[in-house]
Image (cartoon, helix red, strand yellow):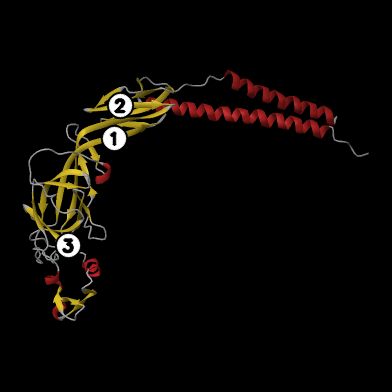
Amino acid sequence: MQRRAAAIYVVFFVVVAIAAYSLTTVAEKPSVSVEGESYSQGDPIPAGGTQWTVNVADGSGNVSSTNDSARFTTSFSNNTSLAFQNGMYRPAPNGSSGGAGTASTGTTSGAGTTGTSTSGPSTSATTGGEGTSAASSTPGTEFRVVIPNASAGNASGGNASGGNASAANVSSFTLRQEFDTAARLRADPAVADTTLSGANDTEYVRYRNGTTQTLDAYLPEPTTRNVSVGDRFPYQNNSSRVESINSSGVTLAWRASLTRSQELAAGENVTLGGTTYVAQFPQNDSVVLSQNVSGYQAEQEALDHFNDRMLGLWGVVIISLFAAILVLAMAYLPVRG
């Protein structure tokens, strides 16, 4: 009787497993394929006035766009220390950066799109035209930016006032040479390595013979340079020009090549020229971009639903077969007595 009942249960579970497996074989898997334009390596995509180029390989890729005359800007503030070397100005190490060398977001010309500028060493451009050159000093010279009527005030030896001046536009700023006093004293065997402080915080240089001299008199006359709006100002490997000056800082501008790219991933959206596309890779060397994003999402949801049901049916097959084997094994257990 025990084995007869077990046989009935075994047959039941096997039938359930066969039925579930039959459904997995006859079920029709929905496809995800919406209409769109097919692109291969190097194909152009005009979008919103910008020409994008397709780069695709091995089932993935990106689109890139290059603007050869993108406009970039950067700025530095009053009282900033700049080092001049090899015909180029840079933020001075260990100096007051004041925001120097930080490139701002620039608007590219022509396309009307926005790109972000990078720091000087990674972006270069050559700006033609006339203008007074600010790069005619000895390599290795350190300068401090002094803007007239700047509210920062008390620039070392400069003409910046200490009042509460507003950030009004001015037409020029001054580069005033600075000296490394400690290094100069150490290199001079005739004087002590450190200065002395006197009345009114006046610093003095002490000679080995016992005499003293004020530090201002000991140091050479600093070189000063006047830079105006429109002058060429080579800064961080960019042939930039002075675009504007106000009492708080200086803005430089230049034009250079700007390359932007956007990744293409299967099933992911990408926006080009204000239009959103969904990407598909029917082959490893091509990509299809479709504007029917909602249609793709609906088909993808249907596919996900189908896959969930398939996993459920395979679960029924596995559990039913396991149950049949378990019942059969228990039916043949030895009976005591």
Q: Quadrant of residue 106?
A: top left
Q: Earlier in the sequence, mark 3 or mark 2?
A: 2
Q: Tag 3: residue type? A: Glu
Dot 1 amino acid type: Arg
Most extreme residue toward the right, as rendered?
337
Q: Earlier in the sequence, mark 3 or mark 1?
A: 3
Q: Is residue 134 visible?
A: yes
Lower sequence index among marks 1 and 2: 2
In which quadrant is the C terminus drawn?
Answer: top right
Number of the front mark, 3 or 1:
3
Rendering coords of residue 132 (x, y %): 7, 46
Check the image and report above or below for 18 versus 134. above
* 9 left or right of 287 in image: right
Based on the displayed image, in which of its 4 quarters is residue 268 positioned?
top left
The quadrant holding residue 11 is top right
Residue type at the position of mark 2 = Thr
Q: CA distance from mark 3 to mark 1?
A: 40 Å
